[in-house]
Amino acid sequence: MLLAVATAIVVNLLTDRWVPALWIALGVLVALTAAVQLGLTTRVARQVSASGPASVAVGGTVRGPISTRSWSDTEQSEPIPPADADIWAGGSGSVAVGEDVHGQIDTDGKRSSEVNRQ
């Protein structure tokens, strides 16, 4: 935000006076703004892993709803996270998100016998 304000001020001053120092300042501000934008958009690749029936793992941002339904007749053993996973959803119907969530997450894990009774 501050870079945008500073750039707007320099552009305003530049349109009033064509001084070489203002051109240099504008060039520096544009280069800084481009560097900040590049730094914000460049991401390091993440290792994402989902284990278990109906589990979901997302390495980035979720912009909608996530819904999982899991039915199982057997008890699941305790899941063990992979050694190389940065984002991990382990277990039946689990959800893991690495960044922001802009939506509803609904999980409903039931055993098959419970589903048949409803």
Image: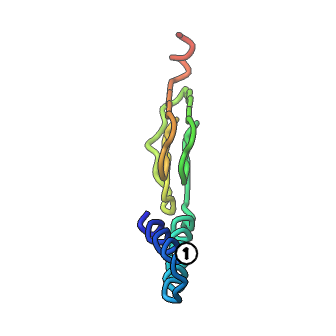
- Mark 1 crowd level (few <14, some 14–19, many ≥20, 10 Å Cα): few
Percent from the top left, x then y, of residue 67? 56, 32
Which residue lies at the image location 54% right of the left edge and 79% below the top edge? 31
Q: Residue furthest top?
A: 118
Percent from the top left, x then y, of residue 24? 52, 86
Q: Nearer the viewer, residue 106 or 86?
A: 106
Q: Which residue lies furthest to the front in this view?
A: 16
Which residue lies at the image location 50% right of the left edge and 31% below the top edge? 107
Q: Say what amino acid the circle numbered 1 marks.
A: Thr
Percent from the top left, x then y, of residue 40? 51, 65
Quarter of the rendering containing residue 38: bottom right
Its colouring scheme is rainbow
Q: Which residue lies furthest to the bottom in this view?
A: 20
Quarter of the rendering containing residue 68: top right
Number of labels in the image equals: 1
Q: Is residue 47 above or below residue 29?
A: above
Q: Nearer the viewer, residue 26 or 17?
A: 17
Percent from the top left, x then y, of residue 15? 55, 75
Q: Is mark 1 on a helix, strand or loop?
A: helix
Q: Is residue 73 above or below residue 21?
A: above
Tag 1 residue: 15
Q: Nearer the viewer, residue 81 or 12?
A: 12
Q: Which quadrant is the N terminus positioned in?
A: bottom left
Q: Which of 98 and 107 is in front in this view?
A: 98
Q: Residue furthest left?
A: 2
Q: In this view, does 79 lie above or below 113?
A: below
Which residue lies at the image location 55% right of the left edge and 45% below the top edge? 62
